[in-house]
Image: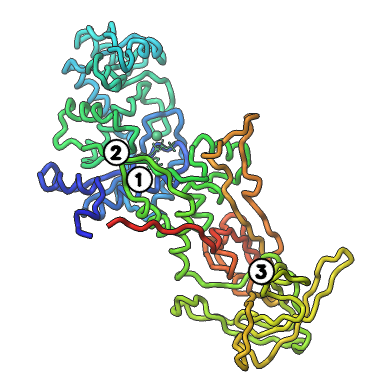
Amino acid sequence: MSETESKNFIEQMIDKDLAEGVYDTVHTRFPPEPNGYLHIGHAKSILLNYGLAQKYGGKFNMRFDDTNPTKEKEEFVESIKADIAWLGADWEDRLFFASDYFEQMYEGAVKLIKKGKAYVSDLSADEIREYRGTLTEPGREDPGAGRSVEENLKLFGEMRDGKYADGEKVLRARIDMASPNINMRDPVIYRVAHMTHHNTGDKWCIYPMYDFAHPIEDAIEGITHSICTLEFEDHRPLYDWVVRELEYERPPRQIEFAKLYLTNVVTGKRYIKKLVEEGIVDGWDDPRLVSIAALRRRGFTPESIKLFVDLCGVSKANSSVDYAMLEYCIREDLKLKRPRMMAVLDPVKLVIDNYPEGKTELLTAPNNLENESLGSRQIPFGRELYIEREDFMEEPPRKYFRMFPGNEVRLMNAYFVTCTGCVKDADGVVTEVHCTYDPASKGGNSPDGRKVKGTIHWVPAGESVKAEVRLYENIIDEEKGVYNPDGSLNLNPNSLKVLKDCRLEPALADAKAFESFQFVRNGFFCVDYKDSKEGAPVFNRIVSLKSSFVLPKKED
Ligand code: ATP
Ligand code: MG
């Protein structure tokens, strides 16, 4: 693949801008509204913006778009900062708040008035909508459009000074009421809102509209490429109009790309808010959600998310990506990095009748068969162990190669054992499985070339650690419908399965919050930071080991 072919369309535009001298550097930003937690879609935008700055030796700014005082919350500001830092996007010392630019925005509006490019309107929101026209009909002139510059300056000053109630007056840009693009039909750029702002308090009772504020924020910070999602494509002429009329030198360029949609999950802020507020999930970072905080808690790594975003690519066409691809990425990232431990999720006792009572020996197990550099560890082995309940059957079906009376299997990294039977309680539930071992098969190696078809994992009964393990499925599938016909949420009843009595290798007793491991056969697991206690870890399953996902072939 040649240099140019491997570049996405944004990189190609940047290359052209640099070649033609439109800009001599690349400066991007991520501008979230602090009104919720970030999700996997935002991660795409963050890594795209940060990645471009890095690739071109430029800069990346972090900016809170806090121009709308109704919805913003300090809690969200902090969570967003933590998420972006965790993803590895470094804004260095460039953390900004759009509300810091309110004075400049006000001056910008005054400048437009003086140029005859903005006027104060007395129309109500409904009237403005009515006057705006439709896709087939041009809009009608606002009666305020004829006001003189002096009158507009006076009225706008009075708006700022609090003389008018919410909705009584607005400032509109004077562009073109007949434009085929409805965004250009004299858009509202300032409104009266008597509200307290989290940053500026009660200093302002007029607030700029997004389409006016955003280009100014970009221009003030010297942003070159203002990357946003497709729904803003129709707003670009207005973006360009604002930076042109305000006469910024080297105005920023807006570029749109398609949002990332993920199948089988819920990303909409309002749905997540509902799940959180109704206590259906354990906060914004419940491991069943795909907020960045939830993915981190579940055990996803920044590297896996970066891999995912890279595989998704950047495009102009909306499409959905399968959740299985995200799972593929975390498996890929962890498989060589994490030790493979033995953990029994549904334990039943295994007694080795010919193993000396009271004896314990230490057996060596490699930490990762595909990555020798992770070394090995020792596991105590004795007469009583735990194995998975499903690894024993009294009457096995065909092709069942695990424990059943008369069958010989390998205990992983330990010995060959031959099952001799089981003990059951009054209800017929198996309480103990019995076997004998072959001392000559130490390490799980055949002493004489005889073969066994099954290898099963185990933990020592006495020394094992009891732990809670949580298995997840997605909680709501947006595609299948968020609501049931009766208006209730269409929740997956199997989204959380809690296993209270799992038994782990003793080495896992000291696992720290956010540490992750492979558990033989059962998947990758991560220590829950919220609910784990000293010596009593709670493990979240990040992902199982099996996958139906096949990496699509790259066209070249
Ligand atoms: P939501 O629609 O989930 O409420 P939003 O777009 O309103 O999200 P913002 O805080 O305004 O949230 O978004 C910050 C940035 O993240 C914007 O530049 C936006 O385009 C981008 N972004 C939001 N959702 C996605 C997505 N699904 N894929 C890629 N980028 C996204
Ligand atoms: Mg938004």
Q: CA distance from mark 1 to mark 2?
A: 11 Å
Q: Position of residue 193 (x, y in %)?
A: 40, 20
Q: Where does the C terminus fall, quadrant-wise?
A: bottom left
Mark 2 = which residue?
256
SS assignment at label 3: strand
In the displayed structure image, the side of residue 102 where residue 381 appears, left or right = right
Question: Mark 1 against mark 2, which lies toward the viewer?
Answer: 2
For residue 78, say whether it is visible: no
Task: Tell me how many marks there are.
Answer: 3
Judge by depth and name the residue closer to the eye, 420 or 521. Answer: 420
Which amino acid type is shown beneath numbered disc 2?
Glu
The answer to whether mark 1 is within 8 Å of ligand 1 is yes
Q: Is residue 166 above or below residue 482?
A: above
Mark 3 = which residue?
344
Kindly indicate the quadrant of the structure image that contains residue 180. top left
Q: Are marks 1 and 2 in contact (CB under 8 Å)?
A: no
Q: Is residue 180 above or below residue 84?
A: above
Q: Residues within 10 Å of mark 2 (few under 14, many from 20)?
A: some
Q: Is residue 322 above or below residue 482?
A: below
Tell me the tag on residue 45: 1
